[in-house]
Image (cartoon, coloured by chain):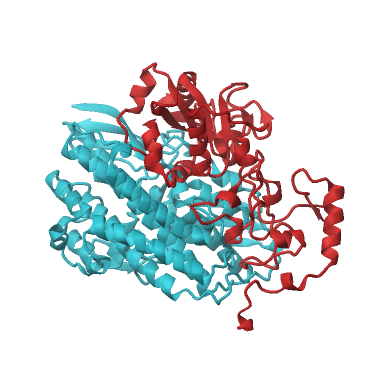
Chain colours: A red, B cyan
Amino acid sequence: MSKAKSSIVWLQGLTCNGNSHSFLNYSHMESFASSFDMLYHPLLLGDTSFDAILQSDTPFDFLILEGALSRDEDIIRKFGYPFHKVLDELASRARYIICAGSCASFGGIFRLKDEAKITGALFSGKSRGGYWSEKSNVINIPGCPVHPAWLIDTLFLLKREAKVSLDEFLRPKEIFSYLTHHGCLRNEYFEWKVDSKQLGEKEGCLFYEYGCQGPMTHANCNKILWNGVGSKTRAGSPCLGCTEFDFPKMKLYETQTNMSLPQTPFGISKRAYYSLAGIAKSFKIERLERKLIDEKDN
Amino acid sequence: MKKITKEIIERIEGEATLELEWEDAKIHFARIKFFNFRGIENILKDRPVYDAIAITPRVCGICSTSHALTATLAIESCYADFGEPLHVSQKAKDIREITLNVEKIQNHIKWFYFSILPELKKISNPKFTPNAFKDKEWFDAQKTIIESLKLSSIFSGQWPHGSFLMSGGVTCDPLKSDIVQAEHSLHTIISFCESYLYGMHIEEFLDIDSSLQIMVSDSSLKRSIEVMMKHGFDSSGRSYDRFLALGESFLYDHASKCVKTTVLPADIRHVAESLENSFFDKEGKGYTYSKSALYKKNYFEVGPLARLMMAKDPLIRDLHRRFKDSTLTRIVARVCECAHLLQRTRVLLTQLDIGEPSYIKPKSNLNYLTGEGVGIVEASRGTLIHKLSVKNGFIKEYDIITPTVWNLGNGTTENPSIVQKAILGLPSIEKADFIFKSFDVCSVCTTQ
């Protein structure tokens, strides 16, 4: 499947279209289009009608799923058919099933409406077993929305028959072994435990008061950036943990504490974290208490 | 002879089914069906109030900033109801407006180049099958859209679903050099629009007071008008000629309605939602997940055409004189609004005073916040309303009225909704499909 163009069918479940719009932000679309045929995408005009694809029995390479899934016909129908008929038919002909975004991966926000009936493809939140109980060709690329490069880089790797290692939630390790915390411009404030005094400022860490999930969230947002320039933390807003199975948690803008202590960063023991935090907090670092750019110095 | 057909409308935001009743080969009535209910209003119940700022953008990927802003304003209005009117700095207001404008700019360009132009190519040549990935114009427009959203993300961190809004201001704190970068992006967007969309400088375009002046330009807008005139879209697609814009805009002074050409003040208190014909209707006769929104029991059109009618924009008023609220007028209005937004955003970036605070923290303890609030924003497709009631910092009720609910409600044969009226009497589904798309339909918003 390396030389010829690979073929894609993009199917939407219960969705806000956010992943489609994020896909449209991909900055090398002509290069993408020279390697992939989009047989069907709900927002793009193509040569083939959806019905023609559905009625044919030709296999294709990638089925991209956007949105939460359900077998219940009262919850979702597609082009006049029960959704599960469409999805089961297309899934049987796809070489890979790629879940673009947290809804297709884990159920996401819309799963909260009815957790028994609305799920991701292979997961319902943290639990294995979603729309399908098992399937060997599913890859999850969560995020609310998915970053276009996460999706398209993975498609290119699969097209080249490269091995794409996955973590326990079937996420590509090259992307999701990083934490949002990596590359955050507020890292030094985190190291020295200097809280953000209030929102709307460049200074301070958002982990202690404002619910930032950066140290616990698997994603390389602050490595590759969004729309070429930004990330939530760079816009002064806490990471909402949108690539994780439990998105959205309750109280997204408030740090949840246990005995007034915040959750520890991913893979760091409480003993290690709280010991170091206690020491760091015992020092007052003058420079970090000041404004980053003090106009009065001029 | 009567018959009923079902047509699926694709390549809109989401998907809709039109069930058409034909009589003597003309559309006699249309039922519009949306199946994709997600229940966001229910999901928000009993959640902490600020969660609404993160969750409501997920109503709609293409207008996520509009939803986040409307939620933010609704919570600010709730603080006022609680006894603490919040002060929001001019800087925060300007950043909110810049990101909202940019969201509309990308929306209008996306809609025109990804939907309207390819549809018109098909209408001109029914044998032609447009393919986005084989079309240079599509890629050029896509690059411009990317630039628009880059401009947004300098402030919003990302698009879609950036979270930079908070009751009391914004969370971002841009540098002077960030503003320079934003101005470069805006320059790139304006260059594209001047070269291809308008065929002239935006200042010249905004000075136009007669539609004839567009026809001497070399532009995609001119070419689209020619096709629309040739295929009768200057006389079809008319609705009630009643418009509404309840949110603030630089285009006009205050919330207004416009009946034909008369502009009068309007008030949100006259807005009512109808569940008639929806699955929420207790009588069980419903056929769609879309609700309908009414103003003084009447259907009103919302969106760029409505806003420019309020603004008494000379070009749109000229088109309206000639073609009333036809498909042609509606489509040119959306393109015209894009020019206003580009010019306005340029001014806002120039005057942005980063010395002011981005955010002023409310004094009240959030855990006691109790009251009711309403937020209104003019989103790409028209008036967007969020209403909520809060008790001790938690959401009790949340109600969302989206622009598409105004334009694409489901009325009756006697009292059809805006779009239902616009497609009555048409001889073909192809025409109905295009007129439907002239409203820039968003089914995901409608069935939130």
In which quadrant is the N terminus of chain A drawn? top left
Identity of the residue furthest to the top in this view: A57
Q: Decide: is B313 above or below B215.
A: below
Relative placement, left or right, of B385 versus B44 is: left
* Position in image of residue B232 (x %, y %): 14, 45
Q: Quadrant of residue B372?
A: bottom right
In which quadrant is the C terminus of chain A drawn? bottom right
Relative placement, left or right, of A72 versus A45 is: right
Instruction: Identify which residue, B196 or B22, lies in the foreground.
Output: B196
| Residue A140 visible in the snapshot | yes
* Position in image of residue A202 (x %, y %): 63, 67
Relative placement, left or right, of A201 versus A68 is: right
* Position in image of residue A13 (x %, y %): 49, 33
* Position in image of residue A188 (x %, y %): 71, 61
| Residue B416 visible in the snapshot | no
Instruction: Identify which residue, B421 or B175, lies in the foreground.
Output: B175
Q: Decide: is B64 above or below A245.
A: below
Identified at 32% across, 41% down, the residue is B412
Q: Quadrant of residue A183?
A: bottom right
Relative placement, left or right, of A186 versus A152 is: right
